[in-house]
Image (tube, rainbow, N blue to C red):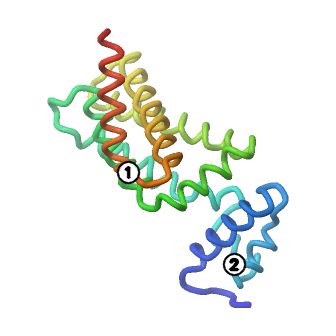
């Protein structure tokens, strides 16, 4: 087996997704993932801290991109508009591969440990967005409310997107969700 190979992270990710879907997350070992990828378990651990991280790699990139979008929103932007900028970044990041996202979502929904990790990731995103809004001068609880609302919109739009058979425009779904939320609040 190869010790180090270009594209290894992607090969591990694909092998893990196949095995998780076929056997289940809990029944799949790192050794099996490595074997299916044609690489070693040692190489796996150079890319991922554990088998769970195969599904969550890139979370810090998503968070950083969303926080940067809030920070760079026009000074005149409302807190919700600044969060909307962050949702546009999230849509670009998350909306790249509908089929892979559908598989990942199904695997996470089928496992309580993974679902808990996903919820922690969303809470971490909300905290980071609230902090970025605070840097813009948005006081609490407004910053927290706007950030949490943005995460709810992200979750609802993403779920609708991955549960649809044909990929739609995730960014449009997020913008629509944000507009719907504002309409519901105004009632």
From the viewer's perspective, is the residue at label 1 or at label 2 nearer? 1
Q: Pointer 1 and pointer 2: residues touching (CB < 8 Å)?
A: no
Q: Residue furthest right?
A: 27
Which residue is labeled 2 in the image? 43
Question: Residue at the spot x=69%, y=67% of the render?
Answer: 18
| Quarter holding residue 69 | top left
Figure check: 177 above or below 117: above
Q: Looking at the picture, how far across and down is residue 35, in whole percent? A: 77, 80
- Left/right of residue 56 with respect to residue 75 in the rendered view: right
Q: Quadrant of the N terminus?
A: bottom right
Q: Quadrant of the C terminus?
A: top left
Question: Residue at the spot x=81%, y=73% of the render?
Answer: 31
Question: Mark number for residue 148?
Answer: none
| Quarter holding residue 16 | bottom right
Question: Mark number for residue 168?
Answer: 1
Q: Which secondary structure lies at badge 1? A: loop
Question: Residue at the spot x=57%, y=42% of the render?
Answer: 121
Mark nearer the N terminus (1 vs 2)? 2
Q: Looking at the picture, how far across and down is residue 70, in whole percent? A: 30, 39
Q: Which secondary structure lies at badge 2? A: helix
- Left/right of residue 71 with respect to residue 123 in the rendered view: left
């Amino acid at each position: 087996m190869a010790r180090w190979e270009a594209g290894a992270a992607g090969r591990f990710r694909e092998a893990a997704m196949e095995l998780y879907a076929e056997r289940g997350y809990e029944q799949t070992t790192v050794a099996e993932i490595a074997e299916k990828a044609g690489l070693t378990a040692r190489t796996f651990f150079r890319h991922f801290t554990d088998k769970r991280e195969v599904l969550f790699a890139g979370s810090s990139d998503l968070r950083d991109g969303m926080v940067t979008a809030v920070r760079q929103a026009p000074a005149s932007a409302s807190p919700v508009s600044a969060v909307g900028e962050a949702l546009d970044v999230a849509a670009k990041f998350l909306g790249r591969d509908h089929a892979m996202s559908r598989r990942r979502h199904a695997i996470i929904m089928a496992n309580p440990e993974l679902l808990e990790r996903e919820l922690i990731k969303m809470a971490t995103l909300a905290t980071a967005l609230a902090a970025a809004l605070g840097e813009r001068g948005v006081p609490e609880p407004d910053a927290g409310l706007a950030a949490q609302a943005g995460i709810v919109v992200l979750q609802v739009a993403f779920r609708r997107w991955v549960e649809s058979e044909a990929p739609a425009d995730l960014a449009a779904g997020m913008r629509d969700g944000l507009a719907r939320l504002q309409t519901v609040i105004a009632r």
